[in-house]
Amino acid sequence: MNDRTTPRPRRSVLYMPGANDRALEKAKTLPTDALILDLEDSVAPDAKADARKRVAEAAASGEYGYREVTIRVNAPGTPWHADDVKAAAEAAPDAVVVPKVDSPETVREVEAALVRAGAPDRTAIWAMIETPRAVFAAAAIAAASPRLTVLVMGTNDLAKELRAEHVPGRAPLLTGLSLALLAARASGKAVLDGVYNDVRDLPGFEAETRQARQLGFDGKTLIHPTQLEPCNRIFAPAQEEIDRSRRIVEAFEEATSQGRGVVTVDGRMIENLHVEEARRVLALAEAVAGR
């Protein structure tokens, strides 16, 4: 379960409320790379049990096509967590999204619960990083289990914990975002940026999404379908990037076959690290094109 060998696109990852049948049905038609069927924030306490049943049935249906289907359970320590994890294990989604993960022990406890409930090996764990404690423990969390494949930033909760303002450029959050990104990459895991709250502000959303890509995130979690198109576009390799990556790989392979040690493309010297990145870009572009 290592994302270094599996360039699965996660440009757009859309939260869908688990208590809403229409939303679960609509999700089957949306151009999102992944879905988070939510049992936590979007579901009222008295609707948790019913939503759990709906989400488990949806995740087990096999009707979401290429989309990666995940279930966000309620946080450890809540009255619903154990039943959520059990139901998710039985539904066998692509992943279980766990909020409020503050330590590697939480990852291992969730993993043990999934195994007890019979979850298949392919059901991964996505851990949400939402608190200062989680940020400081992010490296240990990311390395806690091979079953953990993705870190998900909970930027709203992190901002609340920091008593930070939501401002353009996200200066108060950049340290936390960067530490989580470093932790994910050190363990070969994927990492997703948090949500953008104002669904009417598409220019602001695009600016934040570009920032996330520039920082190195694999994609962004979303709260509304209108955010899908710009997110998919920004996180997909641009044609110019694809063309340059092809030139790099071709030039390197030609030089290698001729025994030449120095390679230049577009006037720049090319090293192995550039070739590795070019191949990653081409693999991602191919995966995106397949959708």
Image (cartoon, rainbow, N blue to C red):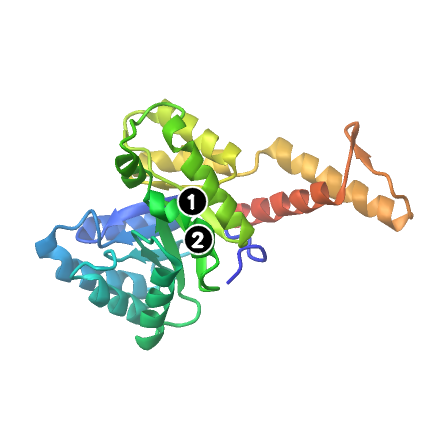
Residue 280 location, x and y as percent?
A: 62, 47
Question: Tag 1, which secondary structure?
Answer: strand
Residue 3 location, x and y as percent?
A: 53, 55
**Any part of residue 174 in sight:** yes
Check disc 2 and give the amino acid type. Answer: Val
| Contact (Cβ within 8 Å) of mark 1 with mark 2 | yes
Question: Tag 2, which secondary structure?
Answer: strand
**Residue 192 badge:** 1
Check disc 1 and give the amino acid type. Answer: Leu
Give residue 254's quadrant in the image: top right
Give residue 103's quadrant in the image: bottom left
Give residue 63's quadrant in the image: bottom left
User: Does 261 sit left or right of 116 as displayed?
Assistant: right
Residue 97 vertical placement versus 270 (above, below)? below
Residue 220 location, x and y as percent?
A: 40, 40
User: Does 24 sit left or right of 271 as displayed?
Assistant: left
Residue 98 vertical placement versus 116 (above, below)? above
Judge by depth and name the residue closer to the eye, 197 or 131: 131
Disc 1 packing (10 Å; few <14; some 14–19; many ≥20): many
Residue 97 location, x and y as percent?
A: 33, 56
Q: Residue at x 91, y 47 (%)?
A: 258
Which label's residue is closer to the chain start, 1 or 2? Answer: 2
Disc 2 packing (10 Å; few <14; some 14–19; many ≥20): many
Q: Going by the picture, which residue comes out furthest to the right? A: 259
Q: Which residue is mark 2?
A: 150
Q: Residue at x 25, y 56 (%)?
A: 75
**Any part of residue 32 in sight:** no
Q: Residue at x 8, y 55 (%)?
A: 46
